[in-house]
Image (cartoon, rainbow, N blue to C red):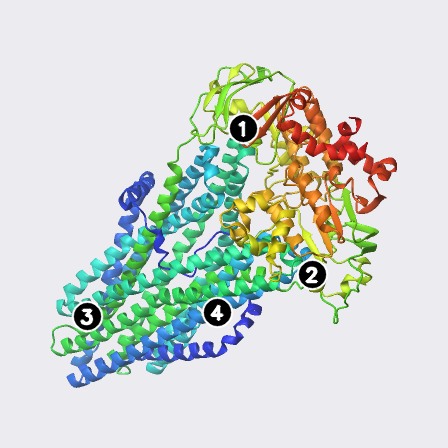
Amino acid sequence: MTNKKGPGPAFPAGANKPKDFKKTLFRLLGYLKPQRNMLIIIAVMAFMGTLFSVISPKLLGEATSSIFDSFMKGTSVDFAFLGKLLIWLLVLYTVSALFTFLQQYLMAGVSQRTIATMRKEVNEKLTRLPLRYFDKHPYGDLLSRAVNDIDNINNSLQQALIQIITSVITIIGIIVMMLFISPLLTLVVCVTIPLSAIVIRFVATRSQKYFISQQATLGQVNGHIEEIYGGHQIVKAYGYEEKALDTFDEINERLYETNWRAQFMSGLMMPMMMFIGNIGYVLVSIAGGILVLNGNIRIGDVQAFIQYSQQLNQPMVQAASIANMIQAALASAERVFAVLDEEEEASELPALVDPNQLHGSISFQNVSFGYDPENPIIRNLNLEVQEGQTIAIVGPTGAGKTTMINLLMRFYEINGGRLKLGGADFQDMSREQVRSRFAMVIQDTWLFNGTIRDNIAYGKEGATEEEVVQAARRAYADDFIRTLPDGYDTVLTEDASNISQGQRQLLTIARAITSDPLILILDEATSSVDTRTEMNIQKAMNEMMQGRTSFVIAHRLSTIKDADLILVMNQGEIIEQGTHMELLRQKGFYADLHNSQFSEGQDEAV
Amino acid sequence: MIELFKNLKPYRRSILLILVSLLAGILLELYLPTLTASIVDIGIVNNDMGFIFKTGGWMIVCSLLAGALTVAVTYLTSKVSVGFGRDLRRRLFGHVGSLSLQEFDRFGTASLITRTTNDIRQIQDVVNMILGMMTRAPIMLVGGIILAVSRDATLSLIFLASLPVLAGLIFLIMRTAIPIFRSLQKKTDRLNLLLRESLTGLRVIRAFNRVDYEKKRFDEANEDYRDTGIKVNRIIAVLFPVMMIVMNFTNVAIVWFGGIRVNEGAMQVGNMIAFLQYAMMILMSLIMLSMAFIMIPRAQASATRINEVLDLHSKIGDPEKGRFAGAAKGVVEFKDVTFRYAGAEKAAVESVSFVARPGETTAIIGSTGSGKTTLLQMIPRFYDADQGSIRIDGVDIREMSQKELRAKLGYVPQKAALFRGTIADNIRFGNGDIPPEQLEAAIATAQASQFVSSKEGGIEAEVSQAGSNLSGGQKQRLSIARALARKPEIYLFDDSFSALDYKTDARLRAALRQETGDATVIIVAQRVSTVVDADQIIVLDEGKIAGIGKHDELLAGNRIYQEIVASQQTEGETA
């Protein structure tokens, strides 16, 4: 579901005010530049269409006057004149409608294309932003910018742009026509304009206030719903249903209070404007009647005036909502531009080296790194890893084991020192070149909404059916895939909830196998995968590690003991390194860790 | 959707009032052109200034009244539609709370949230629109026609031509546009899905260098969306001009034929002017009606989604008269229990029988999909057995009320769920009688004292929504404390130590052993080290029990258990 706007709020929340109106407006207009010629054509059409529609009430009035005059004089109606007039009118109406159609038709293309360009830009921008950025910005916020805000801009472009043109022309055109017919009667109509302005202001400010508090309460209701649904099991197990409902009732009631007020206020606009329209209508009827009596104007002119005053009403209401729409659009544009202006990953040129020729050795030379460069958590790390070696990374939860992954995958750039792959400096290669030699199997088992086949093939562009099946076999995933009703064609849902966590993990292993990497990064943690599946995973991982340089976030004693080097991490830092025996002898953090984890089981087992 | 409108019943008085006010307001508005007509036909023709002022005065009174009535209608419709939304949201929320896990999972958390928030919103908007606009338009239409006919029946024949033409054209355009609107909605969803995926899969996408592939996928979807958007907007572009043409042509026809009628002396000019007004009102109401119809299909989809949930009733109910389990404390007995998920071919749990006794720890171990969690979740009756029975102290759990049953249990799920409130609120969790010392003790046993006291406010520290200000391990420990604080007869741990580091895990288990004392403890576990000292270990394989016994016994004679141990502890044993 997209987040369509609430109940026709002509007035979105006031928090939506752009900070720098002018700058954002010009930048937004910049997107329309490629379509400049088209926009000029559209503007001309809008001008013509409105012009013709402004003239017609006067002509229709002429017709009525002619009939009335004949009636008053007691002569027969001048049908020849009437007929000619009406034919002219038919032509005018048709032409006006045609212009209106063309202008709308063309505008549809302009706005959709502009928006598609912007959406594409945002999407590509996201691919160039460093991971650092995503750490600080929650997905929800980014999504809302990329979806809701762009949607917002789209709506305004589509409607506001044309409406500005037509409204302005209509208002000017009508006032000119009215002045032309009768300045006095025009004055009568104009009395209602300040009245409209007052009403619009009154309603707009008030409803804006209520909309703001409505949005806030709505957020609370949604938050509560998410929380309670998310914890459904616990809510049931602890008999919390009634309490949850009580809280819900309380917030829901508050939502009701702000919601109906906001709805009422914004709903007032139409009837109030209609009321003012009616007042104008009455005034014109009275004043017009008197003027006709005095012979100042003709009866048809009064009729034309009635139509004009009604037509005038609409653009007035529109102008109010357009102003709000533009404001909201600019606020949205500002948020989108903020993303577009974020600092990107430094662009780089691919090195001349062929990454496929590189050895799988890794060397850290005086590497320093910190998520916040002020607070380095890795200082002067020196590490030589030969091709085919296994490096175990151990440490308690939150010790910063993923930091190592982040550096190796070059999700983050190191702050100092050198990091080399096969003797070639990371900095001399492009990120893609570096990453093409790595594969990772991490706890975050991300799979996309697509078939199992496509998900496994994801590891290698253009992987063949055979490669996919082969990888699945080697990942011990083939068996379970075949028991699924659609086998390899089974479509995974968005969060892959139609297969189990363990199965998801097997698929990510298969995916890594397809990519046939030089260096492996594995996370052994199998929190929701258990023993027998884990055994399969273990076997698959072991096979994969054969002959490859591997960095393993290790949870198994066997892996750790066999590792060529163990990195012990705690609180973001590498605090010890060495082999199993060396570290045990040190009787440091590692020795402690080892004893607490394994001693108990050992005692019982033996 | 009609089904849902039954929820409007409590508001029937307000709705009646809305209809009456609408009717009165519209009649007044329709009366205005009649008065104009008399200004022309009587005032002007007879040169009667006094009449013009008098009639004008009446007109002002009428518009004031009409305005006041419309404000009243707006007030009432806001209250009714928003109230309706509130009631429906509450009903749905309460209903979802009553669903068993199996029913809940059929929709999924995300989908249920959307249904309770956005979908209700849609329906609420439509109710607002129906009450405000859609009732107004038909009344206006009928009233306008009646007045027009009463003014001049012959001239009204024009409507016989223009109304069907307008209705027909609107219908044609809508019929073309609505399916495209629907497909546009699907394409929007697709676009959002791709965006979401590219954000959640950020690391994987970059790791496998598939950025360009993702870009291509997005571009395709984006262009597809754009083209459909252009198409649908172009169709809609026809709508407005077409309506204008019909309206204006009708006006021209009225003047032409009105001229003829005036010439014949069958009609007065003022009436003709009034007639033009009626024509405008009638056609406008038809246009409004057609606009409203655009919104209906969207709401229809929402209504269907809401009804899907409301129509699903929990199969797990309370017995008429709950039996109360006797004095013995917490003997859990599975007797030949079989359970199969709806639509599943294989049973998730098959012919399982065992007894878990007070003061003992029963551990359940097995591979993914072997049915461990399902087995555990059958005890609080998240699922009911298809065959066999589960008894606590000899009483079938289906004969107890869910409330009583669950009060005996301390359940700790795999994924800790915390809620907005204080830490203390989260541990008490609806059980206000827990004394503070017991709270502290539970926190201490769960190895949470240290981090709790480091928080500002200690146990009164605020937990944000879904516990997002706590780490996974912290959440899990609080979730364990929650179970401990109740001092239940039976503890159910579903792999509840996975987010803890080894040291904490070991300390926690040692503390637990003392704390749980006489209670029955059932643990679903991953690590063999967690289960080695259990009093009995149940090895599950494909839903069936592959062995029950102590660690040593199973190690000696159970093949599956041996495999499990081998995968984890080869080194440990030879050492």
Quarter of the image with the C terminus of chain A is: top right
Q: Which amino acid type is marked by label 1?
A: Glu
Q: CA distance from mark 3 to mark 2?
A: 82 Å
Mark 3–mark 1 CB contact (< 8 Å) = no
Q: Which residue is mark 1?
A: A573
* Residue A189 point in image, percent of width and height: 20, 68
Q: Image check: A500 left or right of A343? A: right
| Nearest to viewer (mark 3 / mark 1) | 1
| Nearest to viewer (mark 3 / mark 4) | 4
How many residues crowd mark 4 within 10 Å: few (<14), some (14–19), many (20+)? many
Chain to which the residue tagged by mark 3 belongs:
A
Residue A470 appears in view: no
* Residue B4 point in image, percent of width and height: 56, 68
Chain to which the residue tagged by mark 2 belongs:
B
Q: Which amino acid type is marked by label 2?
A: Ala
Q: Which amino acid type is marked by label 4?
A: Gly
Number of the label disc, if any, that sits on residue A301:
3
Picture residue at 67% right of the left edge, 45% below the top: B496
Q: Residue furthest right?
A: B557
How many residues crowd mark 1 within 10 Å: few (<14), some (14–19), many (20+)? some
